[in-house]
Amino acid sequence: MILSGLNKKYVFYQLENKNEKFNSNNKFKEIGCIENVHNVYDDDCPGIIDLNNGRLFSWMNDDSNIKIIEYEPNIRIIKSFNGYQLHNAGLINDKYICLMGLNYPTFYTWLMDTENYEIVKTFETPENDCFYGTICNWKFFCGSDESFKIDIIKFENGEFVKENLSKKVFTSGENNWEERFNWISVLDENIIATCNLNGKMFIFKGN
C-alpha cells in the first residue's frame, strides 16, 4: 500500500501478516518512504501505474514531472524527467505505456518503453485527450470531456502508427460545461461509467 500527501512523501506499507487476505481488519507496518516525489494539494493527486516488476510509474500534471520508483527490493527513485504535463497514462501491454498530455502548446500521445523508460514514439494529438483504459493489447479507450474514442497503436513497416477506430461526440459548443464529462472509469473492455457536471451519471456499453 502507498500513501501520498501534502508533504510530497510517498510512504509504503506492508501487511504485518503477508499471508492474510486483504480485509478491513488488516494491520500494516511502514516499510519505507521517499521524500520530494510530487507536489500534492487540494483534489489533485499523482497518478500511479504498477509495472508489475517492483516499480511504479508516477506523474503529477502540475509538476510536469514523471518519476520511475522502485519499491522492491529497494525503495528509491530511479528516474525523474520533466516537461511532460500528463493528463493520464496506462499500460497498453507488458512492454509499453501510453501517455497522453500537454507539451505546451501542443497535445501529444507518447509511447514509452518499460524496459529503459525511454519515449520511443510521439504522436501529435489534435484534442485535449486523456487515456482512459486498455481494451486489449495495443487497443485503448481515450477521449476528452465531450467525446469517447477507441484508438490502437500498431507496428507497421518498422514504425509505430496510431489509428482511430471509432469516435463519438456527445456535446458541442463552448458553453455546454454542465453537460461535459467530469470523470470517466473503464469497467471492462466494453463498458465505461461517467458523470457530467450537471450531476448525471451514464454507463455506456460498446457494441
Image (tube, rainbow, N blue to C red):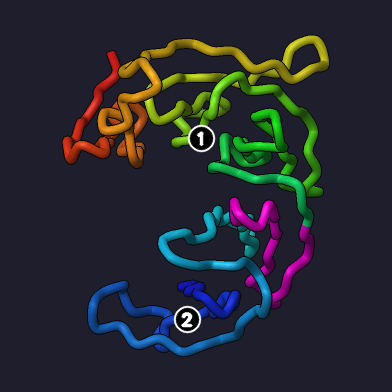
Position of the C terminus by quadrant:
top left
The amino acid type, in three-letter code, at marker 1 is: Phe
**Is 102 part of what is drawn in magenta?**
no
User: How far apart are the alpha carbons under marks 1 and 2?
Assistant: 30 Å
Circle 2 packing at 10 Å, graded few (<14), some (14-19), many (20+), is some
Res 180 label: none
How many labels sit on residues?
Answer: 2
Res 14 label: 2
* 175 shown above or below 201: above
Tag 1 residue: 131
| Residue 18 horizontal side relative to residue 62, left or right | left
Residue name at image x 65 percent, y 45 percent: 85
Nearer to us in this view, 83 or 49: 83
* 135 shown above or below 54: above
The image shows residue 87 at horizontal and vertical percentages of 55, 42
The image shows residue 152 at horizontal and vertical percentages of 56, 19
Magenta part of the chain: 59-80
Nearer to us in this view, 66 or 52: 66
Residue name at image x 81 percent, y 48 percent: 116
| Residue 125 horizontal side relative to residue 15, left or right | right
The image shows residue 4 at horizontal and vertical percentages of 51, 73
Q: Which of label 1 and label 2 is nearer to you?
A: 1
Q: Earlier in the sequence, mark 1 or mark 2?
A: 2
Residue 113 falls in image quadrant: top right
Residue 92 falls in image quadrant: top right
Residue name at image x 60 percent, y 67 percent: 39
